Image (cartoon, helix red, strand yellow):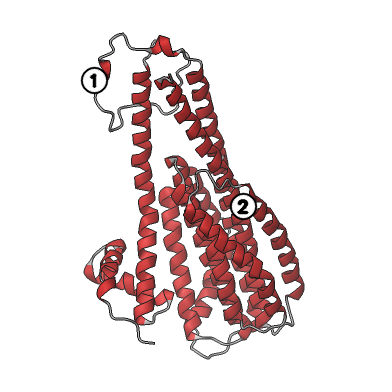
């Protein structure tokens, strides 16, 4: 007959399996981040290439494509190493399936750019869609993490990567504007939206990142004051020029270089975030392995309580009571299985409570995105216009953005069908 200790050991092995899957996921997130960074640069160079009617930037663009292809191969290997039967869930795998379709279509996109068959805006939107799919993989990894500390790191990393993507879109849009030599009101509004979106993502990052990493970004963002001032100057040139007025096409390269410098600094912080995540996974896994060894060293008979009725005298463990998640049991042979089970239950409850807190940020993001999609569909708005509408409603009603999003979604069933 199997004892309680047997199933306590089985529970610990399940926890270790989940942590090992998270370790694989952290590697996947790291490689995904590197591919996103490469594609962001490829997108910017493609815009410069198209904006100059193919007369410039062809060689650096081809070099960047080769780098992206190497990283893509590495990412596909990471996908292959994921265990489809453990710890990730249908949503993550569906995101990966979607991304693979995008990666398969990437050569055709590059051919369109080579032939200058697409405008810069069309090419940008294509890259944005693929990068959004890659970031969705990171989002689902954060949403499926079963350890709160790891989940917090993933949420911080996802929001930092999303902020960096908005910075990349800003680089691409500004590059195309300068290269075209003419201001465009719609693109100017898009730039303002992208700048605002960056700041919102970076604010969430600061809420979830540890103090060391938050300070690292604050320092990196201000370490080159002259470059920051130059970026702000060129932003003003792009965003305040009268619609249709001429822009200096020669500023396309300085703009690209200035934005790239900031994005490279962001990539340094992103790499530190990814490295910290991997070290955290390793630490958590080792702690769980040490605990498992302690469990396996116990003798089930020696850990039985002196009074069998003690089971009915212990309170049901439903909250945290000062338990230590990494406490070992190998030297505590006088403890009963019931005591250890209760400690395990308290620890799991603590994990569940903290995960609920961390995932609240992810759930809020989902609701806001759904509300924006509803406004886009029923009011024929762009993504930027839908977000601006939600924010304006929140300000006018003195309510949180998430509360306004929930109110919009509650009206979904009574909204009229969109006219075609």
Quarter of the picture containing the N terminus is top left
Q: Is residue 230 visible?
A: no
Q: Is residue 384 above or below residue 203?
A: below
For disc 1, the neighbor class at 10 Å (few under 14, some 14 to 19, many from 20) is few
Q: Position of residue 374 (x, y in %)?
A: 35, 73
Locate residue 234, reporting x and y percent: 55, 75
Q: Secondary structure at mark 1?
A: helix
Q: In the picture provided, is 153 more to the left or to the right than 397? A: right
Can residue 331 be seen here? The reply is yes
The residue under the point 71% across, 65% down is: 64
Q: How packed is label 2: few (under 14 Cα within 10 Å), some, or many (20 or more)? A: some
Residue 383 spot, x, y in % from top left: 43, 74
Q: Dot 1 corresponds to which residue?
A: 312
The residue to which callout 2 is attached is 79
Are circles 1 and 2 on residues that touch, CB within 8 Å? no
Is residue 276 found left or right of 357 in the rendered image? right
Give 241 or 89, whichever is nearer the viewer.
Answer: 89
In front: 389, or 141? 141
75 vs 3: above or below: below
Residue displayed at 56% across by 35% down: 282
Residue located 71% across and 77% down the image: 111
Which quadrant is home to the C terminus? bottom left
């Amino acid at each position: 007959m199997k004892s309680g200790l047997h199933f306590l050991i089985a529970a610990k092995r399940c926890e270790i399996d989940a942590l090992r899957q998270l370790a694989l996921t952290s590697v996947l997130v790291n490689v995904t981040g590197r591919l996103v960074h490469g594609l962001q640069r490829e997108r910017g160079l493609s815009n410069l290439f198209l904006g100059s009617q193919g007369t410039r930037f062809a060689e650096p663009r081809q070099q960047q494509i080769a780098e992206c292809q190497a990283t893509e191969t590495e990412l596909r290997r990471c996908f292959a190493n994921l265990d489809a039967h453990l710890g990730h869930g249908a949503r993550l795998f569906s995101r990966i399936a979607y991304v693979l379709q995008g990666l398969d279509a990437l050569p055709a996109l590059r051919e369109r750019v080579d032939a200058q068959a697409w405008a810069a805006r069309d090419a940008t939107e294509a890259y944005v869609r693929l990068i959004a799919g890659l970031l969705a993989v990171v989002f689902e990894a954060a949403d499926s993490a079963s350890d709160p500390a790891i989940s917090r790191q993933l949420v911080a990393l996802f929001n930092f990567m999303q902020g960096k993507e908005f910075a990349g879109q800003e680089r691409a849009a500004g590059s195309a504007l300068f290269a075209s030599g003419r201001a465009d009101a719609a693109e100017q509004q898009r730039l303002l939206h992208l700048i605002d979106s960056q700041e919102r993502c970076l604010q969430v990052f600061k809420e979830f990142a540890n103090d060391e990493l938050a300070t690292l970004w604050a320092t990196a963002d201000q370490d080159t004051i002259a470059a920051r001032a130059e970026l702000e100057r060129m932003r003003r040139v792009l965003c305040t020029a009268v619609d249709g007025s001429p822009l200096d096409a020669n500023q396309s390269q300085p703009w690209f270089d200035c934005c790239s410098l900031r994005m490279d600094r962001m990539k340094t912080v992103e790499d530190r975030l990814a490295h910290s995540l991997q070290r955290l996974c390793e630490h958590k896994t080792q702690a769980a392995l040490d605990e498992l060894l302690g469990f396996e060293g116990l003798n089930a008979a020696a850990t039985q309580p002196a009074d069998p009725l003690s089971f009915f005298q212990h309170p049901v463990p439903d909250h945290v009571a000062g338990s230590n998640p990494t406490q070992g049991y190998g030297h505590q042979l006088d403890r009963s299985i019931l005591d250890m089970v209760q400690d395990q239950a308290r620890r799991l409850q603590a994990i569940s409570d903290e995960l609920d807190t961390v995932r609240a940020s992810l759930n809020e993001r989902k609701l806001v995105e759904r509300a924006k999609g509803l406004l886009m569909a029923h009011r024929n708005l762009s993504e930027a216009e839908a977000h601006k509408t939600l924010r304006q409603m929140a300000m006018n009603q003195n309510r949180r953005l998430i509360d306004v999003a929930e109110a919009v979604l509650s009206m979904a069933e009574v909204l009229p069908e969109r006219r075609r």
